[in-house]
Amino acid sequence: NNLSAYVSVMKLEVLVFFQQWKEAVDLVQKAGNVQLFLSSTFVVVRYTFLEALAYLKAAQSSSGWKKRQMKKCAHKAMQLIRGWAKNGNVNVVHYLYILEAEFAVLNGKKKQAEEKFIAAIATSSRNGFLHDRALAHELASTFFQAQGDDRWAKYHIESSNTCYQEWECSGKVEQLSSMSI
């Protein structure tokens, strides 16, 4: 029903912001096709983005059949977002850059991932999506830390923290403050 669909979107939002990828994928799979019950275009678009991101991040820590299945699910959601962007929805361009960055990470394309993270941060900043800029910085920090580039990892986690502070997301600020790079 409508209410449980909206609750699923809000739960997914929290799981993604606190990087609980396995739980996010479990929620998406359990919830089914909630887009059918969402009347707001924004909420459908947001859910599709969060769903794709959860699948990509979960795929990065999976292998074999499970990894291929999650990559396929993410790709399907990314195609929807790509279509919306091609049809002129400028409010999804930063989503696409974030997803393309994580897709590049999944495929081992480090330079492409770096370029897409930079584009995601710039686009979210330019279009006023502070919370998504914070998320993009945080994801970029994780990427750079995995590459052993502590200087850029630290820069992006500090930038993410600044964005979350400006957004007044105290729980996330506390979480980031407890991390060490």
Image (cartoon, rainbow, N blue to C red):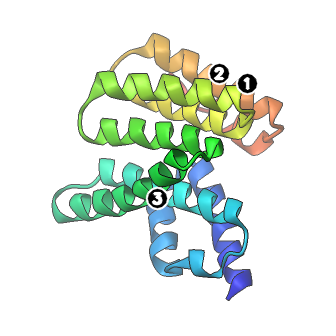
Quadrant (top left, top right, bottom left, bottom right) of the N terminus: bottom right
Q: Compare residues 170 and 66 and report the one nearer the observer.
A: 66
Q: Which residue is mark 1?
A: 162
Give the amino acid at mark 2.
Ser
Residue 42 to residue 4: above or below? above
Q: Which residue is mark 2?
A: 159
Amino acid type, residue under disc 3 in the picture:
Leu
Q: Position of residue 145 (x, y in %)?
A: 41, 24
Q: Looking at the image, tell me whether mark 3 or mark 1 is earlier in sequence order.
A: 3
Residue sticking out furthest to the left: 64
Between discs 3 and 2, the one toward the N terminus: 3
Is residue 80 something one can see in this rendering? yes
Taking depth in this image into account, of 50 and 160 the one nearest to the observer is 50
> Is there a contact, CB below 8 Å, between mark 2 and mark 1?
yes
Q: Residue furthest front?
A: 87
Residue under pointer 3: 80
Alpha carbon separation for disc pair 2 and 1: 5 Å
Q: Amino acid at mark 1?
A: Thr
Residue occupying image coordinates x 44% and y 29%: 116
In this rendering, the answer to whether 166 lies above or below 171 is: above
Residue 72, given in percent of the width and then of the height, sits at 29, 61
Which residue corresponds to the image point at 46% horizontal and 49% vertical from the top-left? 82
Q: How many marks?
A: 3
Cα distance between the residues tagged 3 and 2: 29 Å
